[in-house]
Image: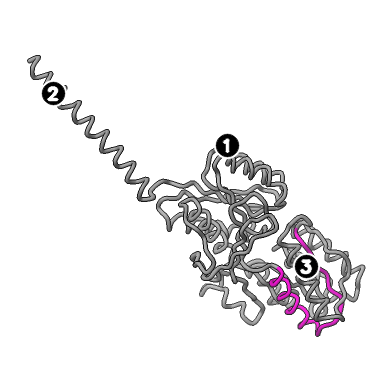
Amino acid sequence: MKKGLLILFMVLAVSALVFAGGQQEGEKAAEESGEEQFEIAMVVKLEGVAWFDNMRLGIQDFNSDFDDVNAYQIGADTADPAAQVALVEDLIAKGVDAILVVPNDPESLVPAFKKANNAGILTFTHEASVQRQVSYDVEAFDNTAYGRHMMDVMADWMDEEGVWQPFVGHLTSTTHNEWVDGEIAQAQEKYPNLKQATNRIEEKENQQIAYEKALELLKTYPDIEAMMGSAMSTVPGVAQAIEEKGRIGKVAAFGTCLPSVAGDYLESGAAKSIHFWVPADAGYVTAHAAYLSLKGEEIKEGMDLGKPGYESITIQKNDSGVPVIYGQAWVDVNKDNLDEWKDADGNYKL
């Protein structure tokens, strides 16, 4: 009886050793095959708006496409730089592998990014071409070129003369200001008869503020003909003011927006043209850049990062030495092609 128990104990011990050895080998094989789970978190400017709702879809798609990642999106309920930094700090404490941010204020994030990097966490941004302390920034296109393009569209509608006004979401927003810089440069170089009403106006990514500022402009500058928005909230806010004051056909809204937000105003004529890149694609590409970096793979010029407009990227280093990835992904929508952005049931695709 004792001999039988001894044999059973020896068999169980050997089995345990074999299982432990197999488990270690399995873990090693998983490591070597890249099956480690990378946690990639995207922190957006503001939750609860259509732009970043769409970006979440891209992050979810990326999560579905790669078995070895856990990718997700978070954001504050206010476009406050301090709130965004707090979320980054929470992710650092959680110990994620990569933090992606669409910054409200790029400079405010630098200390948190440095802390993340010191903890072995990679950092990335989108819409922040001057960002410091990140592995890469991802841009849908060259921002100055995008601003120049929007100016061309607006100037054509204005017959290249008249009074116009640029808006930004935040005066600290690098991307928004680069677009406006491009607009102003294009106007100065090509359209000398276009006059800017006043300094760029900050509307804090808030449609109500954009509406109120537009009403003030219509009163102060009765000869104004066009208002150009950078935040997605500007076009609907401005267009609402134009409709309310009965100025359709005499004044029009232009700028970055989505069809689902500005479609009704394009159809009414209060808005004439909107411009954007697909947020879901930008989110996906930024996550892809993080994933390749976590895998130790080099990101090179001409690479295809998996979405339209990013099939052949270019890379330029900013003044801080951070490589900035550029796509060619802007889209123009007006009343003539608005239906292309609707499903068969009439709902907007974006």
Q: Is residue 168 magenta?
A: yes
The amino acid beneath tag 3 is Asp
Against 297, is 328 above or below?
A: below
Dots 2, 3 in contact, CB < 8 A: no
User: Label 3 belongs to which residue?
Assistant: 181
Left of 238 or right of it: where is 132?
Answer: left
Quadrant into which the C terminus falls: bottom right
Q: Which residues are magenta?
A: 144-169
User: Label 1 belongs to which residue?
Assistant: 93
Q: Pointer 2: residues within 10 angstroms few (<14), some, or many (20+)?
A: few
- Which badge, 1 or 2, is on the more N-terminal residue? 2
Quadrant into which the N terminus falls: top left
Residue 8: mark: 2
- Which badge, 1 or 3, is on the more N-terminal residue? 1
SS for dot 2: helix
The amino acid beneath tag 2 is Leu
Q: Nearer the viewer, residue 80 or 243?
A: 80
Q: How many marks?
A: 3
Against 1, is 70 above or below?
A: below
SS for dot 3: helix
Q: Nearer the viewer, residue 45 or 105?
A: 105
The amino acid beneath tag 1 is Ala
